[in-house]
Structures are given as structure tokens and as C-alpha cells.
Amino acid sequence: MLFLSDNAASVHPKVWEAMRAADGPDSPYDGDGHSQALDAKFSAAFGRDCTALWVATGTAANCLALATLCQPHGGVVCHEEAHIEADEGGAPGFFLHGAKLLLVPGESAKLTPEAVRAAIDPIRDDVHQVQPHALSITQASEYGVSYRPDEVAALSALAKERGLGFHMDGARFANATAFLGCSPGEAAGPVDALSFGCVKNGGMSAEAILFFDESLADVAKYRRKRAGHLQSKGRFLAAQLHAMLDGDLWLENARAANAAAAEIATSCGERLMHPVEANELFVRLSPDERESLRARGFEFYDWGADAARFVTAWNTREEDARALAEAIAAL
Amino acid sequence: MLFLSDNAASVHPKVWEAMRAADGPDSPYDGDGHSQALDAKFSAAFGRDCTALWVATGTAANCLALATLCQPHGGVVCHEEAHIEADEGGAPGFFLHGAKLLLVPGESAKLTPEAVRAAIDPIRDDVHQVQPHALSITQASEYGVSYRPDEVAALSALAKERGLGFHMDGARFANATAFLGCSPGEAAGPVDALSFGCVKNGGMSAEAILFFDESLADVAKYRRKRAGHLQSKGRFLAAQLHAMLDGDLWLENARAANAAAAEIATSCGERLMHPVEANELFVRLSPDERESLRARGFEFYDWGADAARFVTAWNTREEDARALAEAIAAL
Amino acid sequence: MLFLSDNAASVHPKVWEAMRAADGPDSPYDGDGHSQALDAKFSAAFGRDCTALWVATGTAANCLALATLCQPHGGVVCHEEAHIEADEGGAPGFFLHGAKLLLVPGESAKLTPEAVRAAIDPIRDDVHQVQPHALSITQASEYGVSYRPDEVAALSALAKERGLGFHMDGARFANATAFLGCSPGEAAGPVDALSFGCVKNGGMSAEAILFFDESLADVAKYRRKRAGHLQSKGRFLAAQLHAMLDGDLWLENARAANAAAAEIATSCGERLMHPVEANELFVRLSPDERESLRARGFEFYDWGADAARFVTAWNTREEDARALAEAIAAL
Amino acid sequence: MLFLSDNAASVHPKVWEAMRAADGPDSPYDGDGHSQALDAKFSAAFGRDCTALWVATGTAANCLALATLCQPHGGVVCHEEAHIEADEGGAPGFFLHGAKLLLVPGESAKLTPEAVRAAIDPIRDDVHQVQPHALSITQASEYGVSYRPDEVAALSALAKERGLGFHMDGARFANATAFLGCSPGEAAGPVDALSFGCVKNGGMSAEAILFFDESLADVAKYRRKRAGHLQSKGRFLAAQLHAMLDGDLWLENARAANAAAAEIATSCGERLMHPVEANELFVRLSPDERESLRARGFEFYDWGADAARFVTAWNTREEDARALAEAIAAL
């Protein structure tokens, strides 16, 4: 029973279907009908005009978005455990030409306006120190905790006040939106760019970067090509995104993953290190307890010396989630 | 009848099959069995130990390969019409951190040792001029012309003599190998790195970078992640490459495309601007003649004011090729 | 008798004096009074508001200026023999993060609107090709030929029409201005940024970048620091520039160098490869003739197989120039 | 009485003399005799073969050195308050093409092997995390504390064990060497590259990068030109370095600055936040106390809310140091 990560789960049958349906000769790159139709579909979903670019990975999505918001000599304010800081192999340094990540602490990997201010206010406004150009948050956070719309709004207001571009890493944006029970537009708030995740949510190889400012998207199109991310058979990426949006499959998948996580959470009680507001659980478990769970067939990652991370996916079986919940309860 | 490009043709059924078979949970990134098995399969095919990395595009393949062979302050010697110079949106400048392309003329977009020497010998060996670090050739060339093994060997000897890394852009390597009727190892010769194309040859979204020096591959693995090209469901890229190599589908597809091109070539005579040694034809055709062909349902790109480019693919129908041949003959 | 280059000539006594006068404790970087007074002095000289930044080299001046006018994914249109292309060790690739130089031919290393159009019009407006972002010309050109004000204006109009930033490399701007006999504002025309040379004209280690748009200067200040070009004892660079502007020493020095070149030119006749409109002469001379001149004590560089380059400086002695003229006449 | 910084103090008369003596025509760049003689002089001083490159700033020295020790996808381990992290405007990100600084805490801005291990041991050896390539320490540290030779040796051993290049930022290397009373070779230990400061120690505009591995210097020479740091009248930078080394002026100047700092330290007692082992004092002083000192004519920087930083220089007058000591004692 796999709780390792949602990033390796199977591809949803409807995604396969849409990809098959997209086969046949068509215009290359993003000139095909599937790619061309994305803007309208995402704009409708978000209730706000946007331009949607597909790319193959969340790392590319995040970094291409940020490269439009931060000049090479600037900095991106983010959480000290943000994916862009900790898990992307230095990709921001590459895509942003050496721009710096300005790290901010915060509970459950979330930022607050106070914490951001505390980090950037001491930066002297001179050329010796890297100035903040952009702010990036993760919805849901690295610890599976979701920003409420008013929290996003407060951070957006701060970003505007300080002249910072505002980006949201939405690798698990579907899970956050499903948890919040609001519209995607509300879950995203007034960000300038959103990395809209799909691969962790039943997709194969497509993420979307949504730009709510067309001039940013224009730059990103050149940068995408320049980074080798403009696939010639782009219709297969577009098709995955259409499959996700059609009939709100993306929310259906996220709800399923969230429900499995919630099921497991019921038995975790005090063991939970963070609220479960998406599809990830960080659970205090001793080495012996982890060994016992693994002996029963549960696969998951250790999280430091005394905890474990469990991630559910769109196709986590209810019985597996229940079995894990019971196994934890029985420890 | 489409002769626009092979980069938008359909995906081969066996590629679809292999991708479907690769679904199901597995290790993420390149930790899955499919990805892990690539080195052995490519080493066997090339008769030479190599490390194979999948990436989604030829641009990424070329630039990640070159980044291991050329330092940021160096230069890459290539043909003045090479894809890396003319069609990759400045990607080499990005991946190689500002390294320079040192351009060389040559018939049919091929380089010769003499032309390379003529370009690099005048470069003063001082810090004011960018020094060549690597040599990159394209097999088959931008004009669909294939290097013979002894031509590759001569360029390799020059590269060694001058201490240059040696890279081959093999976006249409299959077509060249099929044309030459030799082994892939012979068609590649002693290059350090080969971009092995698959997307133009019936694949969907996978190219391989083959490194014949493990230390280069080690660097490229970090650079691939850093460029956002390490897909989490990498098994679907690996599966495409396996499908290509299994039963030599890659050569079968290339032979089909080459045969269609050869069929068309039979009627072109003096109109041909370059020998047809792969799956591309560059044909002298007046605007009127092109209009006449288009009126009959043939789609293709203009090539300057007085010529056209026709590209065949793995799935070009014999009757379409014949029809085009006859239409040209009838002009 | 040295005619090798003006870039190694002695430092003018007034420059020394100004530097000595600037010693004593002061604010570091560019906070000192000398640095702070540069904007006003250059604005007065050019009859146009500008912001002046000192840097130590022409390469840094050119590249910091261009980095404000061209994004990393764009291109800088310049002459194929421009200093930024041929002699700066790939510095534009470094400072501009991989942006590309788009090369244009042209007599005497000068650009014309026609030549620029011929180079950029064929660039397809798509992401596969690097788009021009800026235009850079050299006043006086690499071959010592000066743009007339109407020529600069025509190029500026083209730049505006195409949305290109406009930069002038003025390593020998003093010589051009002296030759043209116009005001510096007329010699520069409506450029966005000018690299104002001083080192080749009797300075030691200071060039100025003049920005005629304050927002560009603001970016350049961060980039200067980031490139390690913000010297802590910047007052010594500022002092050199003040010495040059005070009493128009820069024009006096340039006139002296130009006069020496003109003197030599009188005897060159048909041997001249380019008009002499600054302080450089490119003279057809056979190997034997060059040997003969060297035997008489003249030092200079060969220029290809059948020519030589002679460069005069602010301190070239009249008798040396005359001697060279006579020696050439006597060949 | 100025205790603001040593980076804006006057230029030593012997430096002026040497610069004047270097005037007159000579080979440009680093082809002049002064530049060519640096390797031998520094090798003799350090008792170890080295190649010496002049540059104008410490930022350029540090970053050009590090760029030879760390690839763009790697990281440089340094103190979290190191100059390269806190005060160079993001220059390492520029020169190292986006490489990351891996920050380590440590008392008085010094690193220990234990602290370095604690920082790098948790880095997973996979492509998702930036791997350390180099280690950089500052001698004397940002807080004016000097590494003992055995401390440098221990860090060097760790660097070797982990395959890290080893760099020393010696902006105040003279002060550390003078304090330690050892040879420069002992104060530097077995580093691969040393930024040898001169500007803060009575110089004008020259620092040296010493490479104890010629192949690193070869790379750095290209990078120096590419960064616009190869001045054409380089003889004036070389002359400054010669003036410093001749008769050990660099140590004489450093001893004077250190003595002034030591004089002040005598009255600081418990107020001292760090041992005084160079020419900087960090002194606990309330806002009132600082105001009182300023009222008496002492100029210095605040250091946070409750402290001040005093920096002495080669030309700090004994009576000024004594006056400051007495003023602090009297508080």
C-alpha cells in the first residue's frame, strides 16, 4: 500500500482518453487547437482573464513564472522550506539567472505578512543587498496546509504595497481548492502567476502556468522555448489539462485524495504535526512504530528521526486508507 | 497530404502500447525500472558503453549535452544554419550560461575539417576572444544530408586534436542511420554525446541524450533537474524509448520516412537543392508551382522565395508520396 | 615610436592631479562628492539630463548598458566586427545572461538602417528565433570612422520604430566628437545609453556609462555592484572623469590624437582602407614595407596579411607622426 | 575622527609612488612587466607557487575565485554572515551562474568543521538538492576574528575529504596575518584560492586573486576578461600590489590598524561582542552612549540597536584611537 508520493501515481483514465483523442497530425508546438483553447477554459474556471502555458514539470512552471516577476539582480521571498528552495536542484538560480531566494520562516510552511515584513524590512535599500522583487507562496503548503482566501489577500496586499510580483506554487492547488471548498479564483486570489499542478493529481506530464497579466505570458513564451520546454507535440500536454478541467475532474481527483488523507488523520490525534488540509500527513512515529507499519505493507517516507510523511493520491483506495488509519490507531 | 514536418506526426501505436504498459505506480523521476534499463539497451545498440538520459525535447537534449562539453566562457563550433543556432530561441545561450556559438559555413549544412579549421584557426589564443570548447554536428544535417562514418571520424580526430568536446545533434539520427545502412555506432562515430531523436520518428515526448563518458552524464543529471526537465513520471518517457529500440522500430520508422522521401525525389531531378539522404527534400519550385501543388492538397513550407521543403514521416502514406512525386513531375 | 594602441598610453597629468586631489577620507563607493557631481556635469556637457556611472573598463560599460536594454532571451543588433562581438571575450553573453548578438555587415564597421533592416526583417516573429531587443553602434567605429549626426538620427528612428533600445559604444567618442566638430549631444544623438570612453584618451581606469533614462540607470546601479564593478574608493574614478570634462580636456586630448592621425594620413593616399575620422589608420602595407617601417623604429600591429593598423594617442608627438608620414611616403 | 570603514581611507604614499612610477607607455592588459612579475613575488611571499591576478574589487576577487571552484549547479558553503552572502549584491549568483550559497552558522562569523558537517551532511546526495562544491571562509572573519593555522588546516582537511574547493576571502588578510604573527603561507593554509585584499589596507583599486593551482588561474583569466575586469592599463593595479609587498608594507599597514584597534579594545572590556583580532571592534553601546560618542566627534556605524562597529585603518592616528578608548572608558 503506497503512501510515498502522489507524484508517481497512475495516470487517470480520462487523461489517457484525452491524449489518445489528441493524436493525429496537427500543428506543432502550441499551435494546435487543444493548446489554443486553454486560455478560454482556464479563464472561465478562474473567473478572470488568464493566459495558460503548458510545461512538463512543476519546477519549470515555478521557475518560468518567477523569471517574469524577478530580475536577475533581485530576490524572491519564499518560505525557507519552499519547494523552490529545497527540492528543485537550484532551478530558480538557473531560470532567474542568479536571483536569490530570500527565506522566511513560518509555521506549517506558510508565510504571513508579519513574517515577510520581518524578513524584508531589514534589507537596506542599497545596491549591496539583494532587493526583493517577488513573493512566492505554496498552495497547499509543503506541509499540506491551505491558505484561506483572506490570508492570500493579505499577502497580496503586502506584495502590491512593496512592488513585488506575486506567485503561487500550486503543485497541489487542486487539493487546497477542494479542501477550502471555494472557487479556484478564490483559492488563488489576486496572484500574478499560478503554477497549476496536474501531474500529482492524475496527470502524466503537464502542468499549467497561468498568467493573469498577458505581458508576463508573452515573456514566458520566449523563456519556455529557450528552456527547451516547448514540446513539438504539445497537443498531448494540452489534452491532459483539458481532461482535468472538463467536468472538474481535477477537483474530483483532489477530493478523493483529500478524503483518504482525512480518513487516515482521524486516527492520528496528537501525532499530527500539521493540520491535514490537503493530501499529506506528517505524523509523529518512532522508528519502531514505522517499522511495524512497514511490516504490514505500508510504504512511506521517514520525515526526520521521529516522524513519517504519508501522501494520498487520486487513486488511493479507501480500504488502504482505512487500513492505515487502523494500523496507526493500533500502535 | 501533409509534408510540413515530422515533428507533428502521429504517435506510433507501439509507443502508445509501451506507455500504457508503463502505467501503474512506480518510483518517481528516473528511479523506475524502465528508466534504469535504458543504459544497457542503448549500450547494446551502440556497441559502446553509454549512459542514457531522457528529456522531452531536442532543444533540451542538445543544450544539456553541450553544457557538459563547453564552459560558460567558451564556444561551440557549429554550422551557421545548425538548429542550435537558428531554431532554438537562444537556448544554448541559456543552458551554457552565455557561451558563444562559433559559426562555420558548409554545403548542405555539413561541416568539414577544413571549414572548421578555417573558422577556428584565426581565433587568437588570448582572453579577448572566445575560445572553442566543443564541436557540434547534426546527423542528418539541417538539409537532410548524412555524414559518412569517415567524415564523422575526421571531424572527431580534429576535435580531439584541438581538445574540443564532440556532440552530435541526432534529431533525425534514425533517418541518417537508415540511409547509411550502417550500425548506429558507426553512424554516431566516436562522439562524446549524442542527442538521439525520437519525437520526430513516431515518439510523443521523449528524446535521449547518450553520454559515452559517464562523468559527463553525472553532470547532466544535475543540470537536467536544474532545468526542470526531470519529470516525476519519467517512466513514460523511458517507455517511449524502449518502444523505439525494441525490434528496431526506430529504424523501421526511419526507413519508411526515407523511402517516402526517396520516392518523391525520383521526380525532382535538377530541382533538388541537396541530396536526399534522410526524410527531407528541398526543392526548387516557383511561387506558381507551389501554388499549384497546394491547390492539389499538398501542405508544405516555403523555403525562401523559390523553393519548398517537404518532410516525410514514419506514417507518410506511399500513395501520398507517389502523388506528390507525380504532381512535381507534372509541373 | 609607438603606434600600437591608445589603450596603453600614459595618463594625462591633469588626471593624475585630479586623482591626487581626491585623496583623503571620503564616503565609500559612489557616495563621495566627486561621484555625486558627475550627473550634473555630464548633463551640462550633453545638454540633456543624464545619469553617469563610472566603471573601470569599456567592456563593463558596454555590457552593463546593454543589460538594461536587452532581456536575456533577446538579441543585440551590432556590426559583425563590433568590439562587443569580437574583442570582449564573450562578456555580452555573461552580462546579458545568454542574449545573442545579431550581426550586421557594413562598410568601415558602420551600420546603416538598410543593413539593420536586412538583418532583422527576416527574423520570424516567433519564439524559435531570438528577437532583437537593442541596437548598438560604435562612435567612432572599429575602423575609426565617425557617424554623422543624421546617420545616428536615422538609426535611432529605426530603433524607436522597432522598439529597440539604442546604445552607443563610445570608447573613442571623444575622437569622433572632435572630428565631427559638433557638440557631444549631437555626436551621441538620441541614444538611450552611451559608453563614454576615457581610458584610451588619457585616463587611467575610468569610463562613464551615461543613461538618458533614469530608470535604466537605477537598474544598472544594482548590476554594477553585482558585477563587482562598484569600487569602494570610487572617488578616484570620478576624479578622472571630472579631469576630462573640466576645460574640455577630453576634446583637447582627442584633437591632438586626431591631428597626429591626420598628419600620417596625408602620406597614405590610396593605401588607406578607411577614411581617417578619428585616431586610427588602417593602411595597406606589404610585409616588406612593414618590416622596413619597423626597422626604423615604428611599432604597430599587423592588420591581416597586407595591412597595418596605426593608432595615435593624446600624447603622440608631432615629430613622431611626421616621421611616420615621411617614412610611409618614402616607401 | 573616522572609524567608519577602512574601505574609504586614504591611499598610502608608497602606493601613489609606485603608480606614478608605472606610468609611461607599456603593454596593455596584463602584458606589462609589473603584472608579469606578480606571480614570482607572491609565490615568494607565500612560500608556495601561485598565480596572481589583479582585479579592482574584493567582490570580483571572491566571485572570480569561487567561479573556478564551483559549477553553476553546485553550492558554496560559507558563513551565514559572510560578505559574499550579505554584502555583495548577489554577485556570487551572477559570477557562478546561479550556484547557491549554503549557509552555516558559527560564532564570530567563523566556521568550524563540525558546523560545516552539520550543514552539509543532511544534504541528500541526489539531483533534487544542490550539492556543495566549494567551501569559503573569511580571514579575518566579518567580525574581525582570525582563524588559527590549525583551524584552517582542519577546514581544509574536511574540504579535501568531501571534494570541495577551498577559498579564503582575505579582504583583511593582512590584518589577520599581522595579528597571528605568522607567515602569510601559514595564515592562508592550503587554500586553493585566496582573495588578497589591498584596498582596505592603503591601496586604491587593486586586489589580488592568488591561485595555488595554475589550471584554476587559467580559467579565471578568461572569466576576468569576460566580466569586464581586465583593465587595459593594468600596470597601475599591479603597481599597487608591488608597493604593498615591497618591504612588507602590507603587514606594516595592517599592524598599524590592528594596534589602533587593540588600543581602543583596552577600554571596552565586557562591551566587546567579539575578540579583537584584526582592525574591527564590535562594541555594545546604548543609543545614548553612541550619541555621546558622536557628539565628541567620533564617526562610526551602528551595529543593530545596541552596538556599534569601529574600524581602524592603516592611517588611524594613535591619538584618535586613544581618544576613542578614553571616551568609551568614560561612558
Image: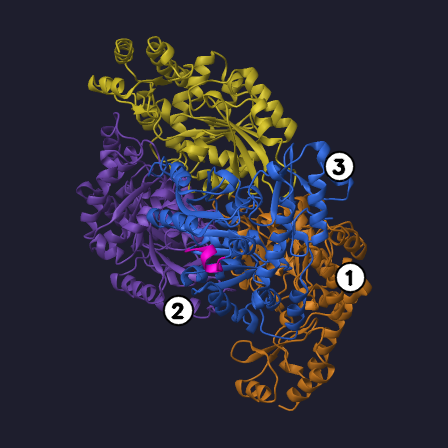
Chain colours: A blue, B orange, C purple, D yellow
Q: Is residue A202 magenta?
A: no
Instruction: Name the chain under label 2.
Output: C
What crowding class fits label 1: few (fewer than 14 Cα within 10 Å), some (14-19), or many (20 or more)? some
Front in this rendered view, residue B138 or A284: A284
Instruction: Give the secondary structure at mark 1.
Output: helix
Whether residue D286 can be seen here? yes
Residue D12, position in %: x, y? Answer: 32, 21
Say which residue label 1 marks.
B245
Which residue carries the number 3 mark?
A292
What x and y, as percent, mark residue A50?
45, 64
Could you tell me the amino acid type at mark 3?
Answer: Ser
Question: Residue drawn at (78%, 56%), measured in percent from left and top?
Answer: B46
Q: Considering depth in this image, is B63 or A274 the residue closer to the camera? A: A274
Q: What element carries label 3?
A: helix
Foreground label between 2 and 3: 3
Same chain for the residues under marks 2 and 1 in the image? no
Quarter of the picture holding the C terminus of chain D? top left
Cβ–Cβ below 8 Å for labels 3 and 1? no
> Residues at marks 2 and 3, common chain?
no
Horizontal side of residue D9 vs A135, given as left or right: left
Looking at the rendered structure, the kind of residue marked 2 is Arg
The chain holding disc 1 is B
Split into 4 quadrants, where in the image is the N terminus of chain D?
A: top left
Dot 2 lies on which element?
Answer: helix
Q: Which amino acid does label 1 sit on?
A: Leu
Look at the picture and state if D251 lies above or below C267.
above
Give the residue drawn at x 60%, y 74%: A26
Identify which residue, D224 or A283, lies in the foreground.
A283
Q: How many marks?
A: 3
For label 2, the crowd category at 10 Å Cα-Cα, with few meaning under 14, some 14 to 19 and many 20 or more, is: few
Residue at the extreme bottom: B330
